[in-house]
């Protein structure tokens, strides 16, 4: 798995590529924690190149979502492949996470 | 024509770095059996969750124990048996959580149950846990490949 991090205004964009499982989840957790510690409370994940995610990956994302909610931050996911989206849907997590079709949409501000 | 059963068996260390190769084997087997793309993804998810549960629950996170993965398939179904040599895990203790409960963890069993036709836990001959995951082949892929319909 590879993660690249870019600053976009008030948001931090993390572009994730590869497979997210019990092996790679600690690395993902570290990258997300580093992004949170950089001071941004808006994280956008571009998951277009995520080929696989399991319950370990979902648990990592839930952890980050809970941390951000505790500090009134936001987490948006974007560009999920149909296979990855299916795992969220099977867990009802598509109802919990803010999932956008494109990276651009995810980076947009909410209307005031 | 007899429905030939083929398969592959591997033993891996209980280290999460071996989850990806097991997924590759499961995907190859699913494709050989004639499963479509969605079902193949479902099978790779299930085998990952099964092995992850072994590492986490049966071996308590230890990375140098043994996991046996036996994948057998025909034109009708694919079966994965995952055996460990650790602690037998009572299935009731790793049942899936309420999906309305928002917390990390507890989704692995739920996902396996969602994507496979059978998920069965048993105590194996070595005192560890044996997990059997089975999925039937359905749809046009099966008919085209096997040339016959399920009776």
Image (cartoon, grey):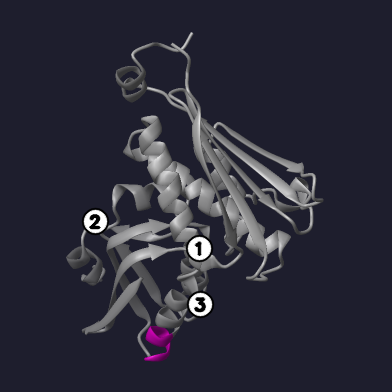
Q: Nearer the viewer, residue A87 or A22?
A: A22
Secondary structure of residue under mark 1: helix
| Residue B117 % position (x, y) | 55, 31
Q: Residue A101 carries which label?
A: 2
- In this rendered view, identify the residue nearer to me: B94 or B102: B94
State the residue at coordinates (50%, 37%): B7
Specify the principal SS of the magenta part: helix
Judging from the image, mark 2 belongs to the subunit labelled A
Residue at (63% x, 56% y) in the render: B67
Q: Mark 3 points at which residue?
A: A67
Furthest-left residue in view? A104
Residue at 38 percent of width and 90 percent of height: A39
Q: Residue B110 appears at what percent x and percent y?
A: 58, 46
Q: Kindly identify which numbered label has been placed on residue B18.
A: 1
Write down the chain letter for disc 3: A
Tell me, yes or no, whether the highlighted magenta stretch contains residue A37.
yes
Viewer can see residue A100: yes
Taking the magenta stretch, the answer to whether it contains residue B85 is no
Q: Mark 1 lies on which chain?
A: B
What are the residue bounds of the magenta stretch?
Answer: A34-38
- Determine whether label 2 and label 1 are within 8 Å by CB: no
């Amino acid at each position: 798995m590879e993660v690249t991090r870019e600053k976009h205004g008030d948001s931090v964009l993390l572009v994730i590529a590869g497979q997210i499982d019990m092996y790679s989840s600690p690395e993902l957790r570290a990258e997300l924690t580093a992004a949170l510690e950089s001071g941004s409370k808006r994280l956008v994940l571009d998951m277009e190149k995520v080929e696989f995610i399991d319950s370990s990956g979902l648990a990592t994302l839930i952890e980050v979502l809970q941390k951000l909610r505790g500090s009134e931050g936001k987490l948006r996911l974007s560009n999920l492949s149909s296979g990855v989206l299916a795992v969220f849907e099977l867990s009802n997590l598509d109802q919990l996470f803010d999932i956008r079709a494109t990276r651009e949409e995810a980076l947009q501000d909410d209307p005031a | 024509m007899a429905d030939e059963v083929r398969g592959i068996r591997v033993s891996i260390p209980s280290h999460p770095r071996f989850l990806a190769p097991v997924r590759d084997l499961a995907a190859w087997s699913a494709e050989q059996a004639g499963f479509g793309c969605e079902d193949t993804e479902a099978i790779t998810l299930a085998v990952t969750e099964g092995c992850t549960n072994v590492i986490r629950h049966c071996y308590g996170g230890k990375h140098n124990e043994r996991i046996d993965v036996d994948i057998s398939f025909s034109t009708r179904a694919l079966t994965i048996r995952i055996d460990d040599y650790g602690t037998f895990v009572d299935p009731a203790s790793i049942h899936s959580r309420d999906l309305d409960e928002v917390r990390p963890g507890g989704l692995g069993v739920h996902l396996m149950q969602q994507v496979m036709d059978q998920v069965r836990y048993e105590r194996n001959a070595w005192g560890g846990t044996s997990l059997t995951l089975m999925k039937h082949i359905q749809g046009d892929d099966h008919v085209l490949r096997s040339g016959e319909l399920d009776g």
